[in-house]
Image: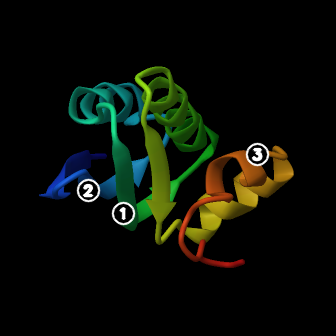
Amino acid sequence: MSFQISAAGPARLEARGELGFGTAAEALKAGLALLGSGAWVVDLAGVTSADSAGLAVLVEWLAVVNERGGTLRFESVPGQLVAIARISDLDDLLFAQSASPAGG
């Protein structure tokens, strides 16, 4: 199991790999190390699988960026995450400003 997040341009990050229980702690730490204030975009097109722990990581990234005075938007959200967010009633919170969530 592996997850990577890296810069893909100014204020833009690209996530790849599995975003779930096995990688959530690593993903949370890696994302927070890169995210700051300002308007950020995280491209999730490279995420191959995700679960509720992955969704929790996205929620925490969003909260911390907001605390830092910035904004965060997700692009190319995998259908698995969209479905979990809808079931958890978090889709509006996470994806209201996001570009075209997959499956929705």
> In the image, which is nearer the foreground, mark 3 or mark 2?
2
Crowdedness near tag 3: few (<14), some (14–19) or many (≥20) residues, C-alpha within 10 Å: some
Crowdedness near tag 2: few (<14), some (14–19) or many (≥20) residues, C-alpha within 10 Å: some
58 versus 79 height, above or below: above
Q: Kindly identify the amino acid type of the residue bearing the numbered disc 3.
A: Leu
Q: Do the residues labelled 1 and 3 touch (CB within 8 Å)?
A: no
| Quadrant in the picture for the C terminus | bottom right
Which residue lies under the disc numbered 1? 43
Q: How far apart are marks 1 and 2 (CA)?
A: 8 Å
**Which residue sits at x=37%, y=56%?**
41
Q: Kindly identify the amino acid type of the residue bearing the numbered disc 1.
A: Asp
Nearer-N-terminus badge (1/2): 2
Q: What secondary structure is marked by label 2?
A: strand
Q: Are marks 1 and 2 in contact (CB under 8 Å)?
A: yes
Q: What secondary structure is marked by label 1?
A: strand
Crowdedness near tag 1: few (<14), some (14–19) or many (≥20) residues, C-alpha within 10 Å: many
Residue 30 screen position, x and y as percent = 25, 32
Left or right, residue 47 beside residue 13: right
Which residue lies under the disc numbered 2? 12
Residue 79 screen position, x and y as percent = 62, 70
Q: How many labels does the image show?
A: 3
72 versus 46 height, above or below: above
Q: Kindly identify the amino acid type of the residue bearing the numbered disc 2.
A: Arg
46 versus 5 height, above or below: below
Which residue lies under the disc numbered 3? 90
Residue 85 screen position, x and y as percent = 73, 51
